[in-house]
Image (cartoon, grey):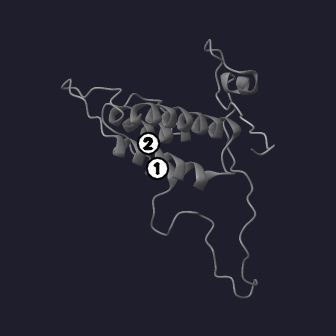
Amino acid sequence: MSDEKLKVTDKRMFTADGRLKEEYRFLAEPSAPRDEPEAVAPPLAPAPSEAPAVSESPMPPGYPEESSARLELPGTPPGLGRPTFYDLVSLLAEPIAIYLGDLELPTGESAENLEMARLHIDLLDVLRQKTAGHLSVQESGFLEDLLYRSRVRYVQKRG
């Protein structure tokens, strides 16, 4: 037997009685909208003489400007605002509960399919990996907690 000690870290956001832990209290506070993206060091660029001309707009030529590119769907309440990172994560996570069998289909049937649930959990993990270092603390915490809860539920169902 080795003398190494195993360290266990509880990364859950809530206490056993359902209250938000102290280190996650910032999630309960309304956050200010992030207007400007964080500055990220650009990759190594060619010498100025070799650099191609870059237009001021981040959109490709001929692409409509952002204000005119907004798609208005019929029946959408006015003032909904632009989709957020939370909307994206929620959209990707929605099928997990269905495939874990926690939600029934409108017909009353179960769509339990643990392999599909695992696929959607893995997709969220890909999103986490690819956005590492580019999310706010709140966004990162939200995604980490969702992944944790989804994995725990998957293991419970898998047995």
Q: Is residue 10 left or right of residue 154?
A: right
Q: Is residue 32 left or right of residue 115?
A: right
Residue 51 against residue 66 in the figure, above or below: below
Q: Is residue 37 left or right of residue 109?
A: right
Q: Residue furthest top?
A: 17
Callout 2 environment at 10 Å: few (<14), some (14 to 19), or many (20+)?
some
User: Is residue 81 visible in the rendered structure shown here?
Assistant: no
Query: Would you say the residues marked 1 and 2 are in contact, meaning their CB atoms lie under 8 Å apart?
Result: yes
Amino acid type of the residue that numbered disc 2 sits on in the rendered structure = Leu
At a point 72% along the width and 23% down the height, the residue shown is 25
Q: Residue furthest left?
A: 107
At a point 59% along the width and 33% down the height, the residue shown is 145
Instruction: Give how far apart the Cα atoms at labels 1 and 2 are.
Output: 8 Å
- SS assignment at label 1: helix
Q: Residue 89 location in percent, x, y?
A: 50, 40
Q: Residue 94 location in percent, x, y?
A: 40, 35
Q: How many marks?
A: 2
**Numbered disc in front, either 1 or 2:** 1
The disc at residue 123 is 1
The disc at residue 138 is none
Q: Is residue 30 left or right of residue 97?
A: right
Mark with earlier residue (1, 2)? 2
Callout 1 environment at 10 Å: few (<14), some (14 to 19), or many (20+)?
some
Q: Quadrant of residue 108?
A: top left
Identify residue for label 2.
92
Amino acid type of the residue that numbered disc 1 sits on in the rendered structure = Leu
Q: Residue 143 location in percent, x, y?
A: 58, 39
* Nearer to us in this view, 89 or 7: 7
At a point 21% along the width and 27% down the height, the residue shown is 109
- SS assignment at label 2: helix
Residue 85 against residue 126 in the figure, above or below: above
